[in-house]
Amino acid sequence: MAASARKAAVGTPRATTLLIATRKGLWTLASDPPRRKWKLTGPDFLGHIVHHAIKDPRDGKTLLAAARTGHLGPTVFRSTDRGRTWKEAAKPPAFKEGSGRTVDHTFWLTPGHATQPNVWWAGTSPQGLFRSADGGVNWTGVDGFNDHPQRKAWCGGDQDGTPDGPKLHSIVVDPRDARHMYISMSSGGTFESHDGGADWKPLNKGVRADFLPQPDPEFGHDPHCMRLHPNDPDRLYQQNHTGIFRLDRPADRWTDIGATMPKSVGSIGFPMTLHPRDPDTLWVFPMDGSDVWPRISPAGRPAAYRSVNGGKTWQRQATGLPKAQAWWTVKRQAMTADNAPTVGVYFGTTSGEVWGSRDEGRSWKCLAQHLPHIYAVESV
Amino acid sequence: MIVRIPTVLRSYTGIDVVEIESAATLAAAVDALDARFPGLRFRIIDEQRAVRPHIKFFVDGALTRDLAAPIPTARELMIVGALSGG
């Protein structure tokens, strides 16, 4: 599968545009068709903390951005003209009055199923799931998750979780069935719904949670990023706090595919991105999760790792990246791939650099620098 | 009553001083602002009707976080975006 899918990579060069969401605003980085020259524009929302920005693949012109500021509460901005103008959501994601919960920030945005052109999904910190049926103008909580009697057991308290707050992320809709969905949470684990979010079941067997007292708990895991392959929707991958895992449905037990990573690098990281056509090819960007969890590139030597066989083996891809003394890392939403004939892979760093590869990770070039701390990079 | 608008909210109001009818409570004053400038309230008051952590209200110069506070005779409400860090 891998070789034939990658051979399908012959064709006309295609320009790529990246949305760069940062701690201080939103930038756009656009290439020429060979992807050799890049132009940075922006910022939009200067000074706003933009956790995610994404374009709607269904209409090709609607963009949503999740933002807040240091002073002001969380909101969602929406553009229907490819980012030329923006308007705030009339009713941003918010928990029910009386629930005692408050949304600190909207963290993750996912366009809905192709058959539901105005539906969007949002994940928040603390963990909440929200849906819009009007293109992101009005958002309502998904009671099947937010009010689920087990939610607090799954997620812990709203003060628990990652340093920037516990999160619901990686909202994935099965391209074959709008009612079949997955979500992941840091912490909480990965969950599945067969009824459009009305009910959820844990899907964590086989995933390590060695920070918990039980050896194989049903939930409470810490997936950092989870992806489904659009050409093989039974193929799921996740980059977890404890390693890298793959699941081929209908099986429900994840396989550890991080064990073959070099021991000196380990298999801990935040982001993961998939080849757009080949379900066996994926990239991760490891970080140092040893000792006190420095959360930087291992030994100050950043590198992506690619597998072309579903995680059986991995190749280090660091040509062009700093060889030493580079202490940044890449957050869970900050690595993406384009859909060009020879796939481009891109990531943004915690030190405000955007790196890109126009040859599927074989070599890297710095495309932008001196930006604020980068939270998300999306190819549009 | 005049309301002094901080820079962080001027994308909603466009101006630094807004005049509104006298309000029975601080919450009613914020509601009046939101009716005129939709979306403003949720940025400063959360869904549990609590003032967001880095927002301060001064009613005739006195700091208050109590949205139910009666302010029928207040002449000035000052909203401040404070101490949010770097």
Image (cartoon, coloured by chain):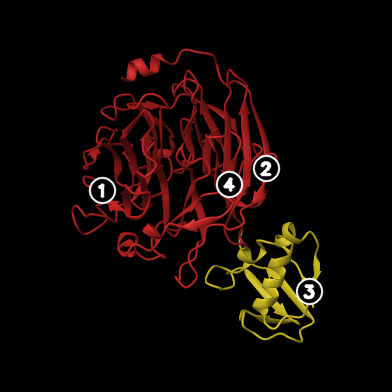
Chain colours: A red, B yellow
Q: Residue at x 80, y 82 (%)?
A: B75
Element type at marker 1?
Answer: loop
Quarter residue A240 falls in:
top left
Amino acid carrying label 3: it is: Ile
Q: Is residue A367 left or right of residue A201?
A: right
Co-location on one chain, circles 3 and 2: no
Badge 3 crowding class, 10 Å Cα cut-off, few under 14, some 14 to 19, many 20 or more, is some
Task: Say which of A361 and B46 sits in front.
Answer: B46
Instruction: Compute the Cα span from label 4 to label 3.
Output: 32 Å
Co-location on one chain, circles 1 and 3: no
Write down the residue under mark 2: A43
Write down the residue under mark 4: A65
Write down the residue under mark 1: A204
Amino acid carrying label 1: it is: Asn
Asked if the residue at tag 2 contacts the one at tag 4, i.e. Cβ–Cβ closer than 8 Å, the answer is: no
Say which chain tag 4 marks: A
Element type at marker 4?
Answer: strand
Co-location on one chain, circles 4 and 2: yes
Position of residue A146 relative to residue B52, above or below, is above
Co-location on one chain, circles 4 and 3: no
Amino acid carrying label 2: it is: Pro
